[in-house]
Amino acid sequence: MSGSIKCIFVALKFVFILLSVRKFGCIVNEFTQTSTVTKQDLRLFEKLSKKLKKADADIHFLKNCRIFGVFPKFITFKLPNVSSSDTYAIRSRLLKSQINKRYKERATIKLKFEAISRSIKSKLNLIQLYTLHKAVKRNVDKYMKTVIEKHEAKLSRITKNVRIPYDTKDTITNISSYTPTPEQMNLLKIGLGFSIRPGKISKSDILTCFESICRQMVKHLCDTNKSAEIKAHLSGLAHTYVNSYKPSQKDIRNIRILKELKKNKEIVITKPDKGNGIIILDRSMYNACINNIIEDQTKFVKINTDPTLKQEGSLHRFLRSIHKTGELDADTYKRIYPKGSIPAIIYGLTKVHKAFGDDGLPNTRPIISSFGTYNYELAKYLSELIQPHIPEEYTVTDTFTFVKTIKDNKPI
């Protein structure tokens, strides 16, 4: 019985495909003869479908232009007696205006499309509606393929790049069970290094930064009598910046999108081990990869207590002892003296360029972050001391060998 039902469904699917692959003109003539719908309504439905998709593609193209800091040809006209910085600002404003204008045009097209859709839906049966949507989708996809190719060619030409991340698939690898929204994908494809202006700023933090700048400038003044004048100017700049700060609507929208992603505790967003890009994976998968690494007893040993305070105290005593003897100046002593140390943190970078393991998990490269550990500032200080003495022909990976030769008093 189930086999016969399956055959019926297959036959119906085949019939629907045959009905929808016909020329759109044939479908229009058939529907106008068998229903009350008019030829003008069906043609308008197809036309508005193309316009709606093209509006989306145009907005996407203009946004990519803004991301890459380039401008389409229609706003790159010459501006007489205008500096390069002013030209860029004017074109940026024109580009923003064009994006907003296209959004409004899209909203108008969508209203007309929804109205004609309701009208057609009331005059056709379900089979006719299915056939119509399939036929229109085929025509729209064919039309949009040409539009997107033109946009890619234009963007490639004005950015002087052979290949650009026009599509989110070029920069984002999603191996999670979560499907991000188009807005989230368009924001993530820019990369983890892309900065967004904050929605709010702390007045005290801004004033503190300007105070620090003022202190550094006053130290290097040739004429100390001008210190009061500089302080007044910087104070005015600080208060002007705080009072005039206002994030754009784009920044507010991007912050909202990032907050939505942050609330999702079921996924982890990180970068790949090789190259730039974005990796989205399930948190359970990420935790399993990290657990496999730290459970390897040949690389890690489990301890019962946290030795951070003991190690910090040992370094405290050592630094105090050499500071008392005068071998360490006061500024360096304050800089490398550890306070509030934390244990090192491990995280992983997914190797998407390699095949998954037999357990179905991706290969992961472990990274130990030492920021904030008891010897972090000391390591930075020693690195600055050693770096000038490393010959230029030595690479970063040869540094350990170089240090070892010095320790063993061997010639290089």
Image (cartoon, helix red, strand yellow):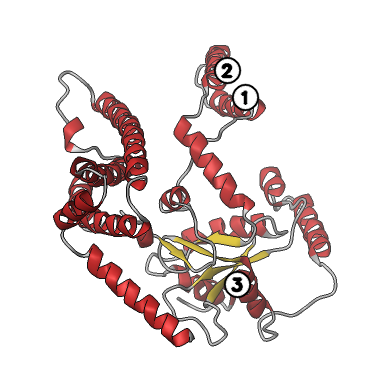
241 on left or right of 158:
right
Position in image of residue 255 (x %, y %): 54, 40
Measure the C-alpha gap from mark 1 to mark 2.
Answer: 8 Å
Sequence-first disc among 3 and 2 = 2
The residue at 47%/31% (across/down) is 249
User: Looking at the picture, does residue 407 appear above or below residue 316?
Assistant: below
Q: Nearer the viewer, residue 2 or 212?
A: 2
**Label at residue 285:** 3
Sequence-first disc among 3 and 1 = 1
User: Looking at the picture, does residue 13 appear above or below residue 168?
Assistant: below
Q: Amino acid at mark 2?
A: His
Callouts 3 and 2 close, C-beta under 8 Å: no
Q: Nearer the viewer, residue 72 or 345?
A: 72
Q: Residues within 10 Å of mark 1 (few under 14, many from 20)?
A: some
Q: Which residue is mark 1?
A: 207
Find residue 102 and report its image quarter: top left
Q: Amino acid at mark 1?
A: Leu
Measure the C-alpha gap from mark 3 to mark 1.
Answer: 44 Å
Residue 385 visible here: yes
Q: Residues within 10 Å of mark 3 (few under 14, many from 20)?
A: some
Position in image of residue 264 (x %, y %): 62, 55
Find residue 172 and report its image quarter: bottom left
Q: Residues within 10 Å of mark 2 (few under 14, many from 20)?
A: some
The residue at 79%/53% (across/down) is 320
Position in image of residue 200 (x %, y %): 59, 30
Callouts 3 and 1 close, C-beta under 8 Å: no
Q: Which residue is mark 2?
A: 239
Callouts 1 and 2 close, C-beta under 8 Å: yes
Label 1: which secondary element:
helix
Q: Nearer the viewer, residue 139 or 288?
A: 139
Sequence-first disc among 1 and 2 = 1
